[in-house]
Amino acid sequence: MADPASPDPSPPNQQATPAAPVVDLEPEHELIVLARTTPEASSANDTLVIGTAIGAAVFGIAFAVSLVIGLPIGWYGMFLALAFFSLGLSIRRYFFDRFPEIEAAELREVPDDQPERPVSNVPALARRPLLTRVLLGSAGVFGASLLALVPSLGPRVGEQLRSTPWASGVRLKTTEGEDIRAEDLAIGTVVTAWPADNIGFERAAVLVMRLSDEPAEPTNMEWVIENSLVAYSKICTHAGCPVALFRERENSLFCPCHQSTFDVRRACQPTFGPATRPLPQLPLGTDDAGFLIALGDFVEPPGPSTG
């Protein structure tokens, strides 16, 4: 609480008004104003607000243009930094003398159960419509300039992460480019296979295995040849590592990255490790010459989930 006998601390460019009661919440919580100082509008501060707001808009446009025409990152990075700085400074100066300074006494007891109750409600000074419009316009221009970043996100992914080159009638090829005949695969054999004309396309890689035990549910038996030959995606559904190790005795596939394990007899359901989705089963068949072919693409996308 201020001492009535002390001199007025108001700076020379501000106006001190007589003490008077001000807005309050309830009669019993009324504030008694001891001193109220209303800052004078400063033309220098107003000029600074308008200048920096316009500067933010100009630098924002310069940022967008330099980004679109492909200037070096140093240029549009500098324009973006200047735009942020100018807009921040403009906002800061806009509120510099926006509210009066008040010293008041509150004649009440603060309830223990309401420690967060507000004790004052001092309205802002009603002026500066021009500054408000300039500042909002500048913020709008600067915000619109950030849309120039959208093309840098690249093209839409679309179905690229869900589909693979596998299609009905596509032959399975070894890494060396040879066709795979079903009768050439003995029990316990495991072969990495690719779609014809897409050898090396990682998300399409499959493991073809001749199991010693007949597959069981939920394996799709229509995609199993001779009750023992199956093909599953080689890409782990956890982090996308290649599932490279086939344990014949355990009828399991093992991912060396994070130790995820999959049951090959039961549709490659995960049985251990962080993977939560099974390896997708490739619809597998043979053509008239006895070579392995795909009957279609994976039903589920291979690899980690992409949302």
Image (cartoon, rainbow, N blue to C red):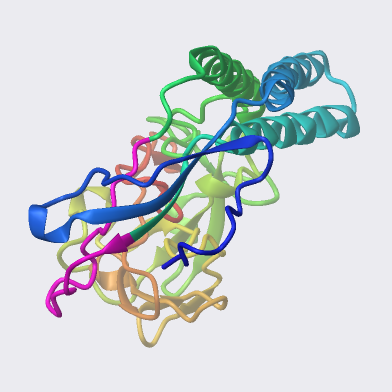
Rendered residue at 20%/66% (across/down): 107
Rendered residue at 40%/57% (across/down): 232
Viewer-proximal residue, 33 or 279?
33
Horizontally, residue 285 falls left or right of residue 175, namely left
Residue 109 is inside the magenta segment: yes
Q: Which residues are magenta?
A: 105-123
User: Relative to 240, is 297 above or below?
Assistant: above
Residue 15: name its quadrant.
top right
Number of numbered discs overlaid on the protein picture = 0
Question: What is the residue that sits farthest to the front in this orientation?
Answer: 5
User: Relative to 200, is 57 above or below?
Assistant: above
Horizontally, residue 57 falls left or right of residue 303, namely right
Q: Position of residue 274 (x, y in %)?
A: 39, 75
Q: Main SS of the magenta segment?
A: loop
Q: Position of residue 240 (x, y in %)?
A: 52, 60
Viewer-proximal residue, 185 or 80?
80
In which quadrant is the N terminus drawn? bottom left
Rendered residue at 81%/27% (across/down): 79
Q: Position of residue 241 (x, y in %)?
A: 56, 64
Residue 268: name its quadrant.
bottom left
Residue 122 is inside the magenta segment: yes
Horizontally, residue 87 falls left or right of residue 30, namely right
Viewer-proximal residue, 116 or 238?
116
User: Relative to 84, is 211 above or below?
Assistant: below
Rendered residue at 41%/38% (across/down): 162
Q: Position of residue 286 (x, y in %)?
A: 37, 41
Viewer-proximal residue, 116 or 123?
123
